[in-house]
Amino acid sequence: MSERTTLQLWALTGLPMVREGDALAALIADALARDGLALRDRDVVVVAQKIVSKAEGRTLDLAGVTPSPRAMELAAEVGKDPRHVEAILSESVRVVRARPNLLIMEHRLGFVMANAGVDQSNVAPQDGEQRVLLLPRDPDASAEALRARLQEMSGVRIGVVINDSFGRAWRRGTCGVAIGSAGLPALVDVRGRPDLFGRTLEVSIIGFADEIAAAASLLMGQADEARPVVLVRGLDWSAPATNVHELVRPAAEDLFR
Amino acid sequence: MSERTTLQLWALTGLPMVREGDALAALIADALARDGLALRDRDVVVVAQKIVSKAEGRTLDLAGVTPSPRAMELAAEVGKDPRHVEAILSESVRVVRARPNLLIMEHRLGFVMANAGVDQSNVAPQDGEQRVLLLPRDPDASAEALRARLQEMSGVRIGVVINDSFGRAWRRGTCGVAIGSAGLPALVDVRGRPDLFGRTLEVSIIGFADEIAAAASLLMGQADEARPVVLVRGLDWSAPATNVHELVRPAAEDLFR
């Protein structure tokens, strides 16, 4: 039996407001130190999408957006700002469902999510401008880069997960999910392993990165109390590292298009 | 800002194999004591569906199942044992998707899940019989009963979540989800709370019980190392308690039927 019987999570308390160009790894290292935490091998650092996007300058001023005829039509259908819809379309490959006040999109990275992740909340208004925040351009790469830098600074080997909150098809409420990861298996395949009675397990590919993302989300908060970085200690894995790219169900397997 | 900045989870190590009629609360209390853990106010005990079902005697011997014509037809379509399909149908209100080796059902409690939760793994074979395990009859009620008993024994007020692993429409791998809960808000509604810049949050109902279920799942394991009870300490909530029943998206809101 594995020794992995306890797990501890800490939300970092001293992270400053993140701005474009900020070196996230350095901010996180400072906040860890202030909270008296030193990274250890197999620690996983979970970072909210919002601050990764902000550091990468993925804000967009809607004043500079000219909606296409398609965006105007869709905006009228769902009752949203046509410029916001234009930004959503520019991040998407497909409208999955459109209803009043609801746009479920397939993001260009394959994520099926509200508004293709183009978010209006928690973005600082600037001179009355209306700004939105897009997902990082390549969240797996962002996670890899953050991991490399944190490893350089700490000398230990860690995992990184970038999380966001998604709605679900058949359940109310959002749940933390991974949109990027590095240094750990996004999926853990336990097929072929015996169950308690020696029979082969049936359902046996685990969305490991998503479960980590959800766990961290419990500590992050959503509103004015946001704590966008969570350290997870106690996880164990033996499978080779794969990215969140592996978590996205290919179109050919999607029964709910 | 809330003080809720750390979370600790323990998987109980000394739980015996659960059998029909077992008093789960007593088994859990004993295992907690052996692991040196005493329940505190606001602790949440997460229990795997499998042992709740076993304790409640929700096993079914397929030898005693006579498949209906409909079950035989569906079994041929998906390539499953017609008696297993009969058991699945008896637990369901609707076939959501049927494909070779895949049956996504709407369980009578509203859960959209593979095989309506009728599981062949981790059930002890008995004299060569093939037995399957059904979900608890009323998992919210099971959670309430377990909570009441654990509270009586401990004198503290806790939450209980019963979890299972579900596949997702657009993501590969399973993720822990709540099928029953008691003593905590299954959903936390943060609508109307301001974001970091005073603007009202957009996506803001959180599947709290599901995030707890996913976090616990990280420690439970899936195969021969199964640890079906996890204690979660450090969660906080102010919303009134609601059950998992609240987490199920009503048919009228389901865009993916």
Image: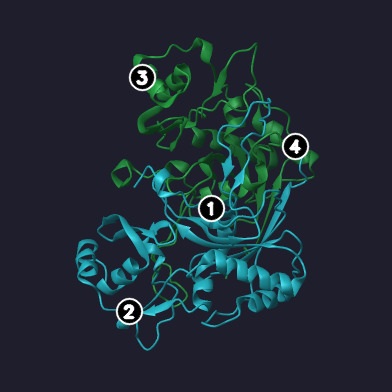
Chain colours: A cyan, B green
Q: What percent of the width, then of the height, locates residue A182? A: 62, 61
Q: What percent of the width, then of the height, locates residue A198? A: 68, 26
For badge 3, the amino acid type reads: Glu
- Label 1, residues with CA under 10 Å away: few <14, some 14-19, many ≥20: some
- Label 2, residues with CA under 10 Å away: few <14, some 14-19, many ≥20: some
- In this view, the residue in front, B10 or B44, is B10
Secondary element at image label 1: helix
Q: Alpha carbon of mark 4 to alpha carbon of mark 1: how far?
A: 37 Å
Q: Earlier in the sequence, mark 2 or mark 1?
A: 2
For residue A188, side relative to residue A178 (left or right): right
Front position among marks 2 and 4: 2
Residue A44 visible within the image: yes
Q: Earlier in the sequence, mark 3 or mark 4?
A: 4
Q: Are marks 2 and 1 in contact (CB under 8 Å)?
A: no
For badge 2, the amino acid type reads: Leu
In this figure, which residue is indicated by the disc labeled 3? B73
Front position among marks 3 and 4: 3
Q: Residue farthest to the bottom?
A: A127
For badge 1, the amino acid type reads: Glu
In this figure, which residue is indicated by the disc labeled 1? A246
Residue at 35% across, 14% down? B69
For badge 4, the amino acid type reads: Ala
Front position among marks 4 and 1: 1
- In this view, the residue in front, B240 or B189, is B189
Q: What percent of the width, then of the height, locates residue A43? A: 71, 61
Q: Quick check: B193 above or below B166?
A: below
Q: What percent of the width, then of the height, locates residue B244? A: 47, 42
